[in-house]
Amino acid sequence: MPQSATLDLGALATTIKTWGRELGFQQVGIADVDLAEDERHLQRWLDAGYHGEMGFMAKHGSKRTRPEELVPGTLRVISVRLDYLPAEVENAKVLGQPERAYVSRYAVGRDYHKLMRKRLATLARWIEEKAGPFGYRAFVDSAPVMERALARKAGLGWVGKNAMLLNPRAGSLFFLGELYVDLPLPVDPPFAGEHCGSCSACRTACPTGAIVADKVVDARACISYLTIELFGSIPEHFREAMGNRVFGCDDCQLVCPFTRFARTTQEDDFAPRHDLDRASLVSLFGWGEEEFLDKTAGSPIRRIGYERWLRNLAVGLGNAPWSEAVEAALRARLAYPSDLVREHVRWALERQREKRSRVIARV
């Protein structure tokens, strides 16, 4: 707790929001730590098995929904959001070009974790300079934190039917971060109302039907889970629906009516690197492991590793229109020293051969 007993907490909260905007965050809000309703929702989701292989979602028990257990002494959570849509990135256009690889828009540039943690640390230092020593800890998708629930309570938006946090001025194309503090700051009112109404565009657009109910996503069917979190073989009944999505999926976000209000980011780090917003599947599949490690340095893509990168690209190539270049690229990986990769390459080659047969039949 700060040493000064005369600290004006209301003025401090206002100043914190001003500092947050100066650090580049689009919005800053303050929430209390009561997540009882969200804890029940999470438990129902876990009980249904919707988390799949993401054992970390259940591993930490109530620390995820009780911030004061994760960081003892926590009284408030300062929640921030940072827009990430690059200025010149190609969005849904790439989804209509099946020979290209679709990488989720948040991952075409540098990893956001370090950037946001550094700014949250700066914010904490400024608070300490004004308020005196206090307890805090910064999080950016790095611990058992209910970031969307906390952001909702802090007034940053509402949870939409796709279970994403939605903001009327940004859709859901932003990152979230948190600063757990032991300061009894005044809290902001939760976002007023839920503005999805009768719209179900996200549920209709989901390629695999992963949004099984309003605000409920079965991760086991979600392409983001299949391409990022799943370690083993991608179930065959989902592969065709994946199309050219090789890292994540944005469909439910791109069709949201509020996405049209999203502003492009001012962060240079989020600009596309190595043409990841428009590269061909064949060119990415041709990367050697060293090239992959070099070109994904500082990228969210690095976390899935080279083997799963090839797995995902093989599925994309299987879904691509037939061409000699695609077939040749797949044949070149038939002897790759990974059962996982070879399985997906064989599946993709079979798909390509079927398409070649249909092309020949039409000639």
Image (cartoon, grey):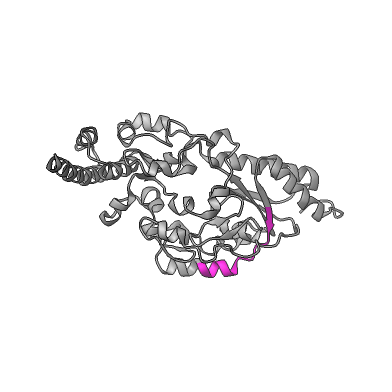
**Quarter location, residue 23:** top right
> Please, is residue 157 above or below residue 15 in the view?
below
Q: Which residues are magenta?
A: 29-41
Question: Which part of the image, by quadrant, shows the C terminus?
Answer: top left
In which quadrant of the rendered image does the N terminus lie?
bottom right
Viewer-nearest residue: 359 or 322: 359
Q: Is residue 290 rendered to the left or right of residue 16?
A: left
Q: Nearer the viewer, residue 16 or 359?
A: 359
Q: Residue at x 37, y 59 (%)?
A: 220
Is residue 320 left or right of 279 when viewed as pictured? left
56 relative to 87, above or below: below
Horizontal and vertical percent position of residue 25: 65, 44
Query: At 49% from the left edge and 64% from the top edge, which residue is drawn?
Result: 215
Q: Is residue 233 visible?
A: no
Q: Please provide percent x and percent y for residue 351.
A: 20, 46
Q: Residue furthest right?
A: 6
Q: Residue at x 69, y 60 (%)?
A: 75
Q: Residue furthest front?
A: 363
**Count of all numbered marks drawn on residues in the image:** 0
The answer to whether residue 20 shows anywhere in this view is: yes
Is residue 32 found inside the magenta-colored segment of the image?
yes
Depth check, front residue: 324 or 332: 324
- Residues 193 and 155: in front is 193
Q: Position of residue 265 (x, y in %)?
A: 58, 39
Residue at image x 47%, y 53%?
255
